Image: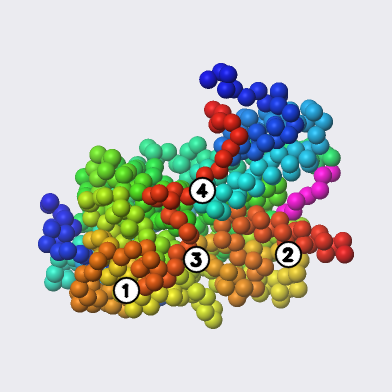
Amino acid sequence: MADDDIILSELSDDDLVLQMHDDLYDGLKEEIEEGVGILLERGWTPYDVLTRALVAGMTIVGADFRDGILFVPEVLLAANAMKGGMAILKPLLIATGAPRMGKMVIGTVKGDIHDIGKNLVAMMMEGAGFEVVDLGINNAVEKYLEALEREGADILGMSALLTTTMPYMKVVIDTLKEKGLRENYIVLVGGAPLNEEFGRAIGADAYCRDAAVAVETAKSFIARKHNALRA
Amino acid sequence: MSNALSRLLATRPWLMADGATGTNLFNMGLSSGDAPEMWNADQPEKIRTLYRLAVDAGSDIFLTNSFGGNASRLKLHNAQARVHELNRLAAALGREVADAAGRPVVVAGSVGPTGDIFAPMGTLTHALAVEMFHEQAEGLKAGGADVLWVETISAPEEFKAAAEAALLAGMPWCGTMSFDTAGRTMMGVTSAQLAALVEKLPNPPIAFGANCGVGASDLMRTILGFVAAGTERPIIAKGNAGIPKYHEGHIHYDGTPELMAEYAVLARDAGARIIGGCCGTMPDHLKAMRAALETRPPGPRPTVEDIAARLGGYSSASDGTGDDEGPVRERRGRRRS
């Protein structure tokens, strides 16, 4: 229906941003890329485009995923649309020295090869503007530690699907403690068989029930960290 | 009705399936990260023991040690060339144990998900999935499996691909999905949608249902969803023995044999014909379930409230079916396409 077509370039800034939130929700990559281009042409800073158009839109996707309104296929499409926008913004963000959201090192723990949940968290974290270093599956403690240091990461994310591999998360956290590094990182854990009680028992900062919760938790810990630095 | 499962279903009101495979194998010394399927070749006596534990605890059906036996999963262990061999052995060991049981026991060839995501977001295509499942099915068939048992699936595309593989292999099959996300599968499938999906297949399964997921209560709500969808097909209930808890360095499931016995009776009264456990369900749980199914008289179909009162609460308010389809987000304008 031609008269239903929305011409993105004819929308006001406010309407365009709202439309981009909807387009992210619907996983429309080309429209997101177009919207990002229009806002940049109108003189928006890359950081504003990232936070007000893309991150705000993905926050809605995340909330509806958390609330059981959206499911994995829709979230994957939204993350893919977000990625299209990020590809345009990334070099500009670096060039303009925009503030970083934070950097996460993520991987499934030693012995665990189940990675769908971990991949979802990585995608949603990228969608929220975080930098993500994905170590893949079956990671030994040395590999996590080496990556955290090399990348100057803020957050460590560990995932496990098996009840037999969950305890390895504690090995990683205990090693961080032994080396006096534990306080340098926000440690988030997740995976189908985990729960809050387990997260507390092994000394993680938080257990994240799903990818949306992981993003919200990471944001609030990073904000606290920034506040603490300022104080 | 030339297969062992249909014959048993025709003579009995309910059948008991088995419990956990992984949890039992880890107790026998399997290291996490190793492929359990390797033991079909390297530790056959332990796999026989695994099967015998289920048979001796009263299972009428047990699943073979082949859950991760497709090329995509075995590739993580560089064993993608051994799909046929490892599946054939899984079923052949099962055949031995079943034939020695002294009563009819069904060898169900376990087929788990590929772990891949379908295109366009992932790499998996229908043709590729059918090819992988078919390869696995032929191995299970060669080893003497009575039926294929497709389980823990979350994507409808993958379920359909497994059905097609069963057709290609000329095998009767059963199929269950894992409803672990607000009453739906990870990919958003509701119990009502699965009930509708199985009837549209050219080769519908002998029985279908739910396995794994969150806990016994959630799984029971899913069973009620199948029943409400009006299915005439036998329903499978294979729930976890509670929820895993961390206790002094190791993990155990908090569901007691008593709880699982309660769950088994509720599942039968709700209308499930094939009842078993999944993760954390050990021989003691199975024995308690069998005893309860045999001794406790059938009761009325439980309501969601009855289930919560007897097994504990649910992980989400809604399961996305019926009048309560859950909230929907209002959006500006229409979807552009």
How many other residues sit within 10 Å of disc 1, few (<14), some (14-19) or many (≥20)? many
B78 or B140, which is in the foreground?
B140
Pointer 4 residue: B327
Cα gap from disc 4 to disc 1, whole angstroms: 33 Å
Query: Which quadrant does the C terminus of chain B fall into?
Result: top right
Label 2 marks which chain's residue? A
A173 or B229, which is in the foreground?
B229
Residues at marks 1 and 3 touching, judged by CB atoms closer than 8 Å:
no
Label 1 marks which chain's residue? B
Left or right: residue A55 compared with residue B273: right
Asked if A155 appears above or below B292 in the picture, the reply is above
| Residue B262 tag number | 1
Q: Residue at x 39, y 42 (%)?
A: B157
Range of residues picked out in magenta: A97-103
How many other residues sit within 10 Å of disc 2, few (<14), some (14-19) or many (≥20)? some
Q: Is residue B304 magenta?
A: no
Cα gap from disc 2 to disc 4, whole angstroms: 37 Å
- Camera-near label (1 vs 3) is 1
| Residue A193 tag number | 3
Q: Determine if marks 2 and 4 fall on one subunit.
A: no
Indicate the position of residue B47 as horizontal and vertical percent values. Answer: 31, 69
Q: Determine if marks 4 and 3 fall on one subunit.
A: no
Pointer 2 residue: A185
